[in-house]
């Protein structure tokens, strides 16, 4: 079984679309091994034989059935996540992991969307598109950032995590205690 990381989009951001991580783990432990969660923003670690796109669709189905609303899910294997971290195209400028984000997409953006995103990055911000990931450096925060707005467009279908969370997810997916931590409990 492959270690995989499921990233849920747009949950627990306000009073609507709330999912308690304990309830999510309880839903998933019946069908998957090594289930754990990391923080309440919708990060699930589990082991599965399903290919990432198939796992994403299955998790979306289960979540909609249990919680009553649709939640887009993007899945990366542990090895894909390690490759993302190793590539780190903005390492030379991103100095604060809380202001450095990776947007995870189901598929690479088309040329017009990629151009629009690149044009939204105004100094001192920086952006790097790399297949199904978009790396964005927001040194002044995301509140007034045109780049952050472009990355948050629903049509893009991305879910973003800051660099600190990406690194922690890789650590959790790689750790030797994966199975012992995962018995339905959050690490």
Image: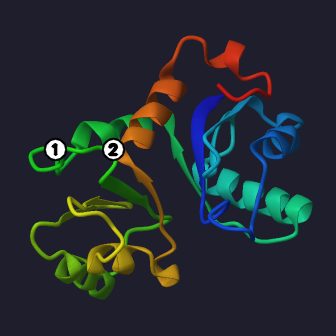
- The mark found on residue 84 in the picture is 2
- The mark found on residue 91 in the picture is 1
Q: Residue at x 35, y 44 (%)?
A: 163
C-alpha separation, residue under disc 2 versus residue under disc 1: 12 Å
- The image shows residue 38, relative to residue 131, as above or below, that is above
Q: Residue at x 11, y 50 (%)?
A: 93
- The image shows residue 97, relative to residue 79, as above or below, that is below
Residue 153 coordinates in the image, percent (x, y): 46, 81
- The image shows residue 19, relative to residue 180, as above or below, that is below
Query: Is residue 44 or residue 21 the one in the foreground?
Result: 21
Residue 33 coordinates in the image, percent (x, y): 76, 28
Of helix, strand and loop, which one carries label 1?
loop
Of helix, strand and loop, which one carries label 2?
helix
Q: Which is more N-terminal, label 1 or label 2?
A: 2
Q: Quadrant of the C terminus?
A: top right
Q: Residues within 10 Å of mark 1 (few under 14, many from 20)?
A: few
Q: Residues within 10 Å of mark 2 (few under 14, many from 20)?
A: many
Query: Is residue 113 or residue 126 the one in the foreground?
Result: 126
Front tag of 2 and 1: 1
Residue 69 coordinates in the image, percent (x, y): 81, 71
Determine whether, in the image, residue 60 is placed left or right of residue 145.
right
Determine whether, in the image, residue 21 is placed left or right of residue 140.
right
Q: Residue at x 33, y 44 (%)?
A: 84
Q: Residue at x 69, y 37 (%)?
A: 49
Q: Quadrant of residue 38?
A: top right
Determine whether, in the image, residue 73 is placed left or right of residue 91.
right
- The image shows residue 185, relative to residue 50, as above or below, that is above
């Amino acid at each position: 079984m492959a270690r995989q990381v499921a990233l849920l989009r747009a949950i627990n951001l306000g009073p609507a679309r709330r999912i308690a991580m304990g309830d999510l783990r309880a839903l998933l432990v019946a069908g998957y091994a090594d289930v754990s969660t990391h923080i309440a923003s919708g990060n699930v670690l589990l082991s599965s034989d399903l290919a990432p796109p198939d796992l994403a669709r299955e998790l979306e189905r289960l979540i909609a059935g249990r919680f009553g609303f649709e939640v887009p899910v993007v899945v990366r294997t542990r090895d894909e996540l390690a490759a993302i971290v190793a590539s780190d195209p903005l390492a030379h400028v991103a100095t604060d992991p809380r202001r450095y984000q990776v947007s995870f997409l189901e598929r690479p953006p088309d040329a017009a969307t990629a151009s629009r995103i690149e044009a939204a990055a105004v100094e001192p911000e920086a952006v790097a598109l790399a297949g199904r990931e978009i790396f964005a450096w927001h040194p002044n925060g995301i509140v007034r950032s045109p780049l952050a707005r472009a990355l948050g467009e629903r049509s893009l279908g991305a879910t973003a995590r800051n660099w600190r969370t990406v690194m922690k997810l890789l650590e959790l997916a790689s750790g030797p205690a994966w199975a012992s931590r995962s018995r339905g409990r959050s690490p």
